[in-house]
Amino acid sequence: MPTPNVFILASDNSPELLPLLRSKPALASSQDEHGYSLLHAAASYSHHDLLRTLVRDFHVDVNITDEDGETSLFVAETVETTKILVEELHCDTALKNNEGSIAEEKIRTDGDFVTVADYLKTVGTRTTSGSSPTDTPDAHRPQEEEPLPPLPPNVTVNMGTTTEDEVPDEVDPAFRARIEALASREDFQGEEGQKQLRELVTDAVREVERDADGRDVRRRVE
């Protein structure tokens, strides 16, 4: 018994098609002498369940092309069919036919299904992976950290290293007393109080420098 014409069965969405494909799965990816496939037939006639079944169950390449280099997206006649191909089955909207046109351009030029072309224009060109070839590196570049705010006037910061032995166990009692006395003054935030604070800090720095000058520093030997 001869095998029925699967392309006609697909165009008619015949109930005979799926049992035939299950018995002979290779037929699902078959193409006629012009490269016309079951996927092209299902898209052209808006047989949505058949589209999904061919791609998902029979693993037909959603980007299979005919002799003109056109996928089933080029023959879609409704927005709903086009959405299934693009959004569910991830058909490549950036693929060009032998004339160098993508589906949106070809469909718009033909002028029969303008709403399909309009939808594809809003989608843009997506590769099978879902990325756009027009994406710029800046879109994926990590955000630069904002610079730290400037230091207040007359304040500088010197970076250095300190060994564990250089950290005092506790603040000198006399120095602590001077800090507490200064902080308790009513004019602490005033000009005189700030002047006293600068002098206190200067004294502390000089004390540290004197201690450093008298310390026995040895070169580390590996």
Image (cartoon, rainbow, N blue to C red):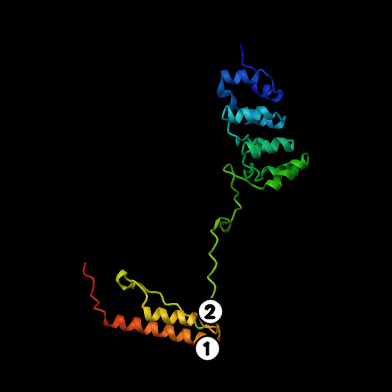
How many residues crowd around disc 1 within 10 Å: few (fewer than 14), some, or many (20 or more)? few
Could you tell me which secondary element the residue under label 1 belongs to? helix
The picture quadrant where one finds residue 34 is: top right
**Towards the viewer: 108 or 25:** 25
User: Percent x, y for residue 32?
Assistant: 63, 27
User: Percent x, y for residue 130?
Assistant: 59, 44
Read off the residue under disc 2. 152
The picture quadrant where one finds residue 29 is: top right
Left-right relation of 111 to 191: right
**Towards the viewer: 68 or 152:** 152
How many residues crowd around disc 2 within 10 Å: few (fewer than 14), some, or many (20 or more)? few
> Disc 1 residue type?
Glu
User: Percent x, y for residue 150?
Assistant: 53, 75
Q: Nearer the viewer, mark 2 or mark 1?
A: 1
Residue pictured at 73% horizontal, 41% vertical: 107
Read off the residue under disc 1. 192
Marks 2 and 1, the one that precedes in the sequence: 2
Q: Residue furthest top?
A: 1
Could you tell me which secondary element the residue under label 2 belongs to? loop
In this orientation, does residue 36 appear?
no
The picture quadrant where one finds residue 97 is: top right
**Towards the viewer: 111 or 13:** 13
Task: Identify whether 162 is placed above or below 52.
Answer: below
Residue pictured at 70% horizontal, 25% vertical: 11
Task: Identify whether 168 is placed above or below 190.
Answer: above
Quadrant the N terminus occupies: top right
> Disc 2 residue type?
Pro
Task: Identify whether 154 is placed above or below 81.
Answer: below
Quadrant the C terminus occupies: bottom left
